[in-house]
Image (cartoon, rainbow, N blue to C red):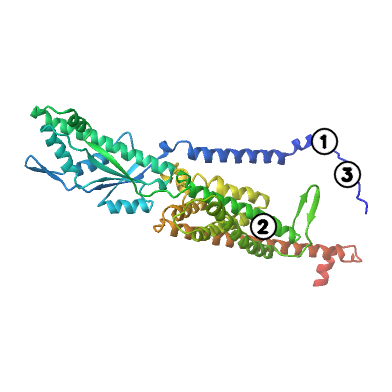
Amino acid sequence: MSRPDAPTPTASSASVLRRPVLWAAVAIAAVAALATALSYLGGFLNPDGNARDLPIALVDGDAGARFAGSRVDLGADVVAQIRAPNPALGRRVRWIVLPDRAAALSRIRADRAYAAIVVPPDFSARLVAIGTSAVAGRAERPARLEVLTSPAAGSFAGTYASTVARAAVDQVSRASSDRLAGLLAPTGARLTPAAAQVVGRPVEEAVTVAQPLPPKAGRGLAPFYFAVMLTLAGVIAANIVHAVVDLLAGHSEIEVWGRTVRGPDLGWTATRRWHAKLLVGAVTAVASGAAVTWAAVGLIGMGTTTSALAVGAFAVLGVAAVEAIALALLGALGLAGSLASVFVTTILGVPSAGGVYPLEATPAAFRFLAGWMPLRYLTDGARALIFFGQERPRLGAAVLTTSLWLAAATVAGTLVAHRLDRRDRLQRRHEVRLDRIAASPLPSDGGTPALAGATASR
């Protein structure tokens, strides 16, 4: 069978530049680029300036001591000194006073504190011993403040909190040195070099890693990248499922190497196609979630503190939720839904996920969005499963919110499909009326077919 001759072009390629719709598309592309730049760069370029209320715990476990016939409690002075307003820190840190070291460990392991400073029971006794020994010409070991760190809190959060805690220890050491020097000056004691060195720096830090990282943890970024992979897998799967189901149902066509491919028209309604997409999407979510987990844990060797099965189950839920969101947007907006799904899940999701920086170090707008964006909860859930073992902080909220996104997207997609079916039914009824009018015989008096039909119906 011969192909018909192709139509002869009647306008040059440059003529499209005179079409307003083209410039509207250019404007949309520019706005999308601007939004992406503002989202990513605005969310990540100034974490120190954006930092607000990073939680660091304080524990006063000092048992006190007696000096010159009176009781001294230098641990309470340390806590008061650290909590005092500090212009250098401003509002970047929120100090949380806890009753004991166990409470501080619990906070850190629940990811509700990024570091802690613990005053040990012998703190006052050690400082008193430094002073009395210096007068006697002996050098005592410096007193210690324990700094509990949490690399699992993330690269920025853990490092920043540890730096602040260590700076606070240095501040306490300088203040303690000045106090000891003031007490020793009236005695006229001549200090040995070793004793003078201890008096010059009477307080040291003792660092304890309270929440270590498993192997191949990407310096605390592994959960975030894992969540991003789940998000991308969901968006990609949704686009594939949407295109393939519509193609097989004969609802749309695709062009491959200049050849148009279209399936037979099955007569499926939008609702039936939506149900098919949900079914295929569920299978795709299981396959994609399992593939991402196998690649991360099995092939690359990402360390986890829980079973790979638990990580995989959460991965399937995450892919399913993102896939449902993207499918609902594709069903409502068509091709524009693909851009909208990327915008919702990724462009706005990455800066508000709390993955690279904690939410306390992001602009206020992204802290607000964090309460809604699915990627934030995927990151929280992945961090709980990969880093925090049995504690699993925020895992319940992550599973609940991700499930709600899945349910809401499913309901929204169903409503969109019903709306499209209703529109199609009304359109078909209108076409049937027009066909009947066109097929009606002309009345003998020359009236219109519509009037004739109306007269006959009476």
- Badge 2, how many Cα within 10 Å: few under 14, some, many 20+? many
Inter-mark Cα distance, 3 to 1: 14 Å
Q: Earlier in the sequence, mark 3 or mark 2?
A: 3
> Which residue is at a point 40% across and 45% down the rendered structure image?
151
> Which residue is at a point 63% across and 47% down the rendered structure image?
339
Q: Are marks 3 and 2 in contact (CB under 8 Å)?
A: no
For disc 1, the marked residue is: 12
State the image coordinates of residue 320 (x, y, percent, origin top left). Answer: 57, 59
What is the secondary structure assignment of the residue under circle 1? loop
Q: Which mark is residue 241?
A: 2
What's the amino acid at mark 3? Answer: Pro
Of badges 1 and 2, the one in the foreground is: 2
- Relative horizontal placement of residue 100, taking residue 315 as reference (left or right): left
For disc 3, the marked residue is: 7
- Relative horizontal placement of residue 37, taking residue 75 as reference (left or right): right
The relative height of residue 285 versus residue 88 in the rendered view (above or below) is below
What's the amino acid at mark 1? Answer: Ser
Q: Earlier in the sequence, mark 1 or mark 2?
A: 1
- Badge 1, how many Cα within 10 Å: few under 14, some, many 20+? few
State the image coordinates of residue 312 (x, y, percent, origin top left). Answer: 53, 59
